[in-house]
Amino acid sequence: MPETPPHRARAEIDLGALRANVRTLRARLAPHVRTMAVVKADAYGHGAVRCALAALEAGADWLGTATPHEALALRAAGITDVPLMCWLWTPGDPWDQGIEAGLDMSVSGTWALEEVAAAAETTGKRARIQLKADTGLGRNGCRPADWPALVARALKAQARGLVKVTGLWSHFACADEPHHPSIAAQLDTFRSMLDHAEKAGVEPEVRHIANSAAALTLPESHFDLVRPGIALYGMSPGPKLGTGAELGLRPVMSLKGSVALVKQVPAGHGVSYGHHYVTEGETTLGLVPLGYADGVPRHASGRGPVLIAGRVRTISGRVAMDQFVVDLGGDSPEPGSEAVLFGSEERGEPTAEDWAAVSGTIAYEIVTRVGARVPRLCVDSGN
């Protein structure tokens, strides 16, 4: 399939902004606390390899991915001398390749410990594993009741030379909601599970629970390492913490298209599928060739903000698969004029957070869902 010309649509990736965000986050940490740059899901749609390299340039110490295949792709791209953790394993995943690649592999239950130990015997190399505690999120991780057994089995495998327990970790459920009671409860549980593991003989290189929200607001949760994800890309972890700009972060992705057509229509003219928008008076309509196949949320129909010809306007009618329409109110920008769906608040552009608000979702989803046919163009604002 031919590459989509960038004049139709493009996502500009500002690596200078990403480096600045890493430095902003690191400035909030105690000197001993290390930083893991989370680049899962193709770096939240921004491009994993380029973002990983930029984060490392700015001082990140670790990289993190969800799946082993994401982590192995980074190793294959030449990022070989950096600690790299991946945490979402399923039975039958390539533990042997993870061992060969020197990955830190998360273990939440005995089945995973058995598989990684078997792979270590096959490869003849010791596996680096981190034990994950479910301190209250209720997803992956080992519940407190099962923790002593998992720790004991891991230590037996370590004594046999099959694994090395390099880390103990967990994940917050509500760190983006300041003062939520679960935050203190999870920290208490984590400390208790750490205490048990360390008294049993685990000597972890790192202990970590802090995501972006906790890295920004909860210094008591930083331990040895923090794992920023969304904050790296310049967005707030949640509206209760303020906007990305208010947190001192710069957006890394700007989504832009070109106005493909401008035409004059009379009053009472229906626009897009279902005619959910009908013009009130004579006006001009602009066609932007981006749609839900490109990641523009259909839920933003009639609400999504777009900057065209110096004014923020609103999508008129339904978002279609490949395009949407904007009522330009009589303005007639030239075809080819730029349409900015989201970018920088400082430049007067709508933000990914604005799109999340009108779509009933979170900024994470807005950037991650930008489709593969939208080319990513790297820019570098410096700093």
Image: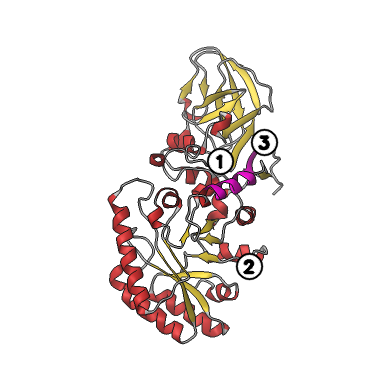
Tag in front: 3 or 2: 2
The kind of secondary structure element at disc 2 is loop
The single residue placed furthest to the bottom in the displayed view is: 160
Q: Tag 1's secondary structure?
A: loop
What's the magenta region? Answer: 7-24
| Amino acid bearing label 2 | Asp
The percent position of residue 255, horizontal first and vertical second, equals 59, 38
Q: Is residue 198 left or right of residue 346?
A: left
- State the residue position of label 2: 81
Indicate the quadrant where residue 348 lies.
Answer: top right
The image position of residue 24, as x and y in percent, is 53, 47
Residue 295 drawn at (x, y percent): 54, 42
| Image quadrant where one finds the C terminus | top right
Say the numbered circle drawn on residue 8. Answer: 3
In magenta segment, residue 254? no
* Real-space CA distance between mark 3 and mark 2, rounded to the nearest whole angstrom: 39 Å
Instruction: Give whichever of 309, 144 is nearer the camera.
Output: 144
Instruction: Depth check: give the residue in front, 41 or 61.
Output: 61
Q: Nearer the viewer, residue 247 or 164?
A: 247
Vertical placement of residue 341 versus 128, above or below: above
Name the element at disc 3: loop
The amino acid pointed to by label 3 is Arg
Amino acid type, mark 1: Arg
Task: Say whether disc 1 or disc 2 marks the residue closer to the N-terminus.
Answer: 2
Q: Is residue 113 visible?
A: yes
| Residue at position x 58%, y 30% in the image | 347
The Cα–Cα distance between marks 3 and 1, rounded to whole angstroms, is 25 Å
Specify whether 236 is left or right of 51: left
Mark 3 Cα within 10 Å, few/some/many (few <14, many 20+)?
Answer: some
